[in-house]
Amino acid sequence: MSIKLQTPTFLIVDDEDLARAQLSRQIGELLPSFNSIEAANVRQARGLLLTNQVDAVFLDLEMPGGHGMAFLPEIRAMGIPVAITTAHERFALEAFDGEAVDYLLKPIENSRLARTLA
């Protein structure tokens, strides 16, 4: 009998194309296999969460059309772990109060990302 491990699916929400690509590349360096879905804003992310099974969300905070902190409780209510990805330290306490699993400051260090993925 062989056991097949599930390939995790991550939703990466960031308004910057390069930031989404960079995070996906970094995850690929740490995980041998994963799926990623990308959204450029909260509205897109909300739609993707309704139509896809997602194991975790990497969520930027300051985006046009909606702030990630306002979206965090909605994601957590679905039982999905959320890691905040941002260049701003000022929302860290609020993020952890909202049950974010981690708060990753950009540029994201691989060692910290590895700890988050674990």
Image (cartoon, rainbow, N blue to C red):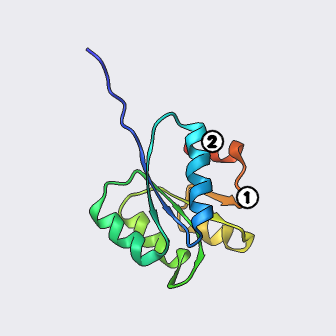
Which residue is more in the foreground, 10 or 96? Answer: 10
- Quarter occupied by residue 104: bottom right
Circles 1 and 2: CB atoms closer than 8 Å: no
Q: Residue at x 38, y 66 (%)?
A: 77
Q: Can residue 106 be seen in this view?
A: yes
- List the single residue furthest toward the top: 1
Q: Residue at x 45, y 42 (%)?
A: 34
The kind of residue tagged 2 is: Ala
Q: Which residue position is annotated with label 2? A: 114
- Quarter occupied by residue 43: bottom left
Residue 47: x percent and y percent?
A: 33, 71
Residue 90 relative to residue 96: left or right: right
Q: Residue 107 carries which label?
A: 1
Residue 62 vs 23, above or below: the answer is: below
Residue 5: x percent and y percent?
A: 37, 30
Q: Which mark is residue 11?
A: none
Q: Can residue 116 be seen in this view?
A: no
Residue 20 vs 36, above or below: the answer is: below
